[in-house]
Amino acid sequence: MRSDVGRLWATRERPFPSAVEEAGAHRTVDADDLAELCQAIAAQESIAEGTPR
């Protein structure tokens, strides 16, 4: 999605499990450009992969 001020947003269709959210993963991220958005998504997925569920 693109906001009215031009920032890009991405959100997961399914929320992370509670333990993953408590570890700091966010379902929705934003960034100034596509490269940053991809990095933000990857960071959240990395948190999720490293968190026991």
Image (spheres, rainbow, N blue to C red):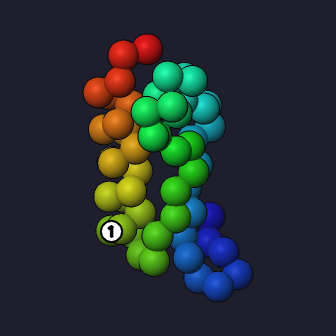
Which residue is pictured at 52% across the width and 45% down the height? Answer: 26
Between 21 and 13, which is closer to the camera in this rendering? 21
**Mark 1 crowd level (few <14, some 14–19, many ≥20, 10 Å Cα):** few
Residue found at the far bottom of this picture: 5
Please, what is the three-letter code of the amino acid marked with disc 1?
Answer: Ala
Task: Identify the residue position indicated by label 1 in the image.
Answer: 35
Between 29 and 34, which is closer to the camera in this rendering? 29
- Location of the C terminus (image quadrant): top left
- Location of the N terminus (image quadrant): bottom right
Image-based side of 33 in relation to 39, left or right: right
Residue found at the far front of this picture: 22
The answer to whether 49 is drawn above or below residue 25 in the figure is above
Q: Locate residue 3: give its quadrant.
A: bottom right
Q: Locate residue 8: give its quadrant.
A: bottom right
Residue 5: x %, y % from top left? 64, 85
Residue 31: x %, y % from top left? 46, 70
The answer to whether 11 is drawn above or below residue 47 in the figure is below
Between 25 and 37, which is closer to the camera in this rendering? 25
Image-based side of 48 in relation to 17, left or right: left
Which residue is pictured at 40% across the width and 44% down the height? Answer: 44
Residue 32: x %, y % from top left? 45, 77
Helix, strand or loop for disc 1: helix
Which residue is pictured at 43% across the width and 33% down the height? Answer: 23
The answer to whether 52 is drawn above or below residue 40 in the figure is above
Residue 29: x %, y % from top left? 52, 57
